[in-house]
Each structure stands twice: as structure tokens, then as C-alpha cells.
Image (cartoon, helix red, strand yellow):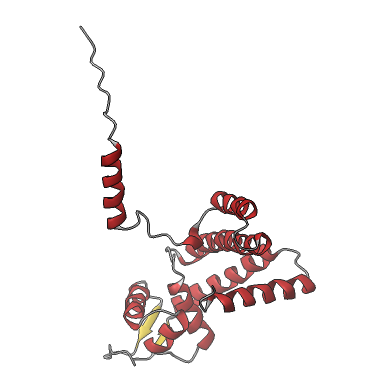
Amino acid sequence: METLVRKRSLPSRASKSRNAEANAAKGPIHSASPAGITKHPLRLLSGVARQSGIGNPDSCMIILSILSASRAVRRALSRELECELGFQDNSGSCFATLVTLYALSPLPATAADLAYHAEVSRASMADIIEALERRGLVAREAGRRDRITPICLTELGHRAARLAVHRFLQVASNLAGDIGSPNRKTTVSTCEQVESRAGVAVL
């Protein structure tokens, strides 16, 4: 019995072009930002910078190194927080909310205060508070559901926040390793300069 082998026909150049235009019109396949680039493309970018002469290769390498390190640090801290808090918090907003309440304890905070410190919209903060409330980590004053309702940690929330904060600080210290005081100041200063320049349009 003859076996039939089907070969997928290759699209013509014209159809390839039309497909590319259609895909471009739909927008990017992934919504990941350049900050999420993995280390391998970062190394390639470094090589391109040195070969092309675009920008200052050494300056580019600093930024690429910061991006790579930042990605690794965020991944490591996310793993620890997921372990301590028992749920994923990719944006860090839930953790920022717990940190704020933990730092202010025993004083309560409003949703507006928490949104400011977590750097999210008030609508997003409302969702975060509801999620934390369902887990029994925060509580609102009984009978009030508006945005000026005082919010505080429950006993369970205080324990969870304390463990998460302590673990975060321990991991951060371990990641820094044996970076001494002189290097620490230089590193912090460099990051502050980059952060400042990233806040404005740099041409």
C-alpha cells in the first residue's frame, strides 16, 4: 500500500509579506517589555553595540548588566515571597501593601494611602484589598466599604507580613553578598543616576 507523504506548501513571498503586515497590524505577540529580555539576547545586544558603534558600548553594558541583574533579583525574590505568602505576586503590589500596613502598624491606612505606596491605581488597590481580605490578612472597619475606610492587618496578616518582610531582607542581604561599603555606595549611586535619567526622555 502506497504511503502518501504530505508536504506543506511554502507560502510565496507575497503571502509572507501580507502575513507579516497582518501580524504587525495586530500588534506584538507578547506584551513583555525590554526589561524582561533574557541574558542571552542581552549578550547579543552588547556585541552589536561594540560592532555597530551605536551608543557608548561601555555605557550600554552597564544598562544591560543592570537589566540582567534586576531580572535575576526579581525572580529570586518572587520565589521567596511566593513561598512565604503562599500566593504569586508577580507585580509585587500585594507585598507592597502588606509592607506598608506592617510598617504603619498599629496605625491603619486608607486605600488611597496604600495605592500611593504600592504605585497602583485606586481601582487596582480595591482588588488587592479584596484579595487580601479573602485570605484573612487584612480587615476593614465593620459596616464601611468606601475608600476612606481604615484598613489594618489582622493577626494572621501581621504574622504573614512579618515573615515575608524578614525573609525579603535576608534574601536581599544574601544576594548582595560581600559587596563592601565603598562598592555599595558606588552601586547605589549608579542605580540612582540611571533611575533619574530613565524618568525623563533621553535622546
Q: Residue at x 37, y 86 (%)?
A: 111
Say whether residue 79 is visible.
yes
Where is the N terminus found, in terms of image quarters? top left
Which of the 4 quarters of the picture holds residue 189? bottom right
Task: State the residue in front, 14 or 141.
Answer: 14
Q: Is residue 193 above or below residue 3?
A: below
Q: Identify which residue is drawn at 26% across, 46% down.
A: 18
Indicate the quadrant where residue 165 lies: bottom right
Q: Is residue 87 left or right of residue 178?
A: left
Regarding residue 83, the answer to whether it shows in the image is no
Give x and y (percent) for residue 167.
59, 68
* 133 to 79, vertically: above or below: below
Against 145, residue 77 (above or below) is above
On screen, residue 48 versus residue 33, left or right, reads right
Q: Where does residue 30 sit, x and y in percent of width and height?
A: 37, 56
| 134 or 203: nearer the viewer | 203
Question: Which of these two is toward me, 177 or 187?
Answer: 187
Residue at the top extreme, as displayed: 1
User: In the rendered image, which quarter is residue 138 located in?
Assistant: bottom left
Q: How many labels were placed on the picture?
A: 0
Looking at the rendered image, the quarter that the C terminus falls into is bottom right
Position in image of residue 5 (x %, y %): 26, 18
Residue 114 at x, y percent in the picture:
43, 84
